Image (cartoon, grey):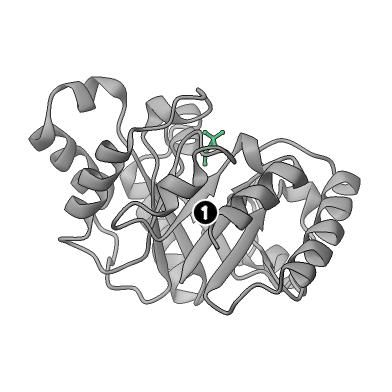
Amino acid sequence: MTIIAGNFKANLTRIQVATFAKELDSILTDMQTSSHLQVDIFPSHTALLTNNFKHFHIGAQNAYFAQNGGFTGEIGLSQLQEFNINRLIIGHSERRTLFGENQDFINKKFRFYAEAGFEIYYCIGEPLSVRQKGKNALKDFLGTQLNGIDITYPKLIIAYEPIWAIGTGESATLEQIESTHSMLATFTSAPLLYGGSVNPTNAREILCTPYVNGVLVGSASLNIQSFTDIIRASK
Ligand code: PGA
């Protein structure tokens, strides 16, 4: 199975996402994609669409660990269920760094949505300072980000996204991706996605790298042409 996912972050409006989704469905129909390909998109909360497309799924970038309640600015399970959504990104570095989500908070989110049977895109990734300290530091750091997470959860997908490669236009090298993924594969059998400046030009070689089961794409997923070029690269 190859997984290609687009994280739109705080980009695209509801109307733009609706147009994108319609085009994506029709392009994927023409592509006659195989059952070995999974395509998921993660629009912003105001642009969530009902998850009933034929060739791809709609997921949420974030949600609070409650059915509903007094959690200003958040959405809960009820709001996702209304859209038939059962996929969620947890642990993205932007949530960890910009919004101060610590491992304890992330654990609560993980447990709640695993209990609800969600497919969870669980993101991990180190800052440059950790990578520069060498292999052991990297292993320890990524291990800490998996603390408390049930890595045997059957609907777990792990996205390795080095922070220094996110939104920078500089993806990790194939050697860095392979060595990090092979290390992760020693402690989990979950599919391993790479994320960080994936684009139509580097997608094919990244997808062909050992231990890479797919990609999580930010910037290059915002444009239907480049996103579908990345999907084509998986063929
Ligand atoms: P990027 O973002 O592709 O723009 O680097 C990746 C991500 O944050 O998932």
SS class of the residue under badge 1?
strand
Q: In this view, does 46 lie to the left or right of 92?
A: right
Mark 1: which amino acid?
Ile
Q: Residue at x 26, y 37 (%)?
A: 176
Q: Residue 76: which quarter of the image? A: bottom right
In percent of width and height, residue 132 lies at 19, 21
Position of residue 166 relative to residue 222, above or below, is above
Q: Is residue 131 left or right of residue 231?
A: left
Q: Which of 219/84 is in front?
A: 219
Position of residue 62 relative to residue 132, above or below, is below
Q: Which residue is drawn at 39% across and 25% down?
A: 164
Q: Which residue is the extreme one toward the left?
A: 136
Q: Which residue is drawn at 57% across and 65% down?
A: 87
In percent of width and height, residue 148 lies at 25, 58
User: In the rendered view of the protein, which quadrant contains the C terminus?
Assistant: bottom right
Number of disc labels: 1
Q: Residue at x 17, y 61 (%)?
A: 187
In percent of width and height, residue 208 lies at 39, 54
Residue tagged by mark 1? 89
In percent of width and height, residue 47 lies at 80, 50
Q: Is residue 148 left or right of residue 28?
A: left
Q: Which of 184/73 is in front?
A: 184
Position of residue 65 relative to residue 36, above or below, is above
Q: Which of 206/154 is in front?
A: 206
Q: Report crowding for label 1: few under 14, some 14 to 19, many 20 or more residues within 10 A (C-alpha).
A: many
